[in-house]
Amino acid sequence: MAAQAQANRQSSSTRVHALSEDQRRRLPLAIQDLTVAYHRKPVLWDVDLAIPEGRLIAVVGPNGAGKSTLIKAALGLIPRASGRVTIYGQPYDKQRRLVGYVPQRESVDWDFPVNALDVVTMGLYGRIGWFRPVASAHRRRALEELEKVGMAPYAQRQISQLSGGQQQRVFLARALAQDADLYFMDEPFAGVDVATERAIIALLKELKAAGKTCVVVHHDLQTVPTYFDHVVLLNMRVVEAGPVDAVFTEENLKKTYGGKLTLLSQALFEYSKDPRLPSGTRGGGGL
């Protein structure tokens, strides 16, 4: 099993290393030899990953596996010890306008004195310009995005006065306003209410239909086959990555979780694969 895992990593590495510059330009995200360390302790080690276009991609793994670190390193939010990351063939700094980001709620200063409409309007700054005035047309556009996630009635509400689920929907609206080609979302489903979860699912469907690519850090194994069509199994390194049907297997999950897949997670995985379940609630379909 260990030999096979090593072979998988070598195969993935070979594929990424073999990419031509023209092939990189067609990929929303290509990561090669990425290593990130905190206080000299590696969190990600020699990660190689090529993300296909127009997919909904879940990044899953145990706590401390480096899932959020992967996104932050790709966006240049934290330093990399080594490695190359390209967005459609170019470094992130040259492709900011193509990228949208929904951070973890815990990382946001919710006491910052802005309302919901202001937050969504910030998603347009890449097109407006940071020191140019915000026109009424920009605010109308921001309001339209709030409408899509059911938050237009709260446009003037101070962001700190919204519930956790409402705050998450505002940040989703901001991501929509960015009109990006590649979206990174860091645990958008964590701790949200049912209405917000439905809003996120609808947003993912809408983005995929528009040909966008979404890379989503996700923790609920049960919903991976239902919400996503591609999965990255991560535990410091990429254990496996590919279509959910091919990659999201019990064997690969055990490799990812160090053979410590909990009884509950295993039961949920088996439940999601049950052929007796109605279409759309079991694994194998994606959106």
Image (cartoon, grey):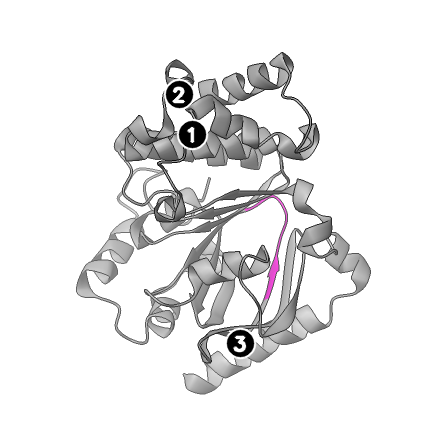
Q: Return the mark for residue 8.
A: 3
Dots 2, 3 in contact, CB < 8 A: no
Sequence order check: which comes first, mark 3 or mark 1?
Answer: 3
- Residue in view at x 57 percent, y 14 percent: 140
The quarter of the picture where the N terminus appears is bottom left
Q: Amino acid at mark 2?
A: Met
Q: Which residues are magenta?
A: 49-55
Sequence order check: which comes first, mark 1 or mark 2?
Answer: 2
Q: Amino acid at mark 3?
A: Asn
Sequence order check: which comes first, mark 2 or mark 3?
Answer: 3
Any part of residue 283 in sight? no
- Residue in view at x 47 percent, y 86 percent: 3
The location of residue 267, given as percent across then percent down, is: 21, 58
Classify mark 2: residues with Cα within 10 Å, few (<14), some (14-19) or many (20+).
many
Q: Secondary structure at mark 2?
A: loop
Q: Return the mark for residue 170.
A: 1
The location of residue 41, given as percent across then percent down, is: 43, 79
Classify mark 3: residues with Cα within 10 Å, few (<14), some (14-19) or many (20+).
some
- Residue in view at x 39 percent, y 20 percent: 150
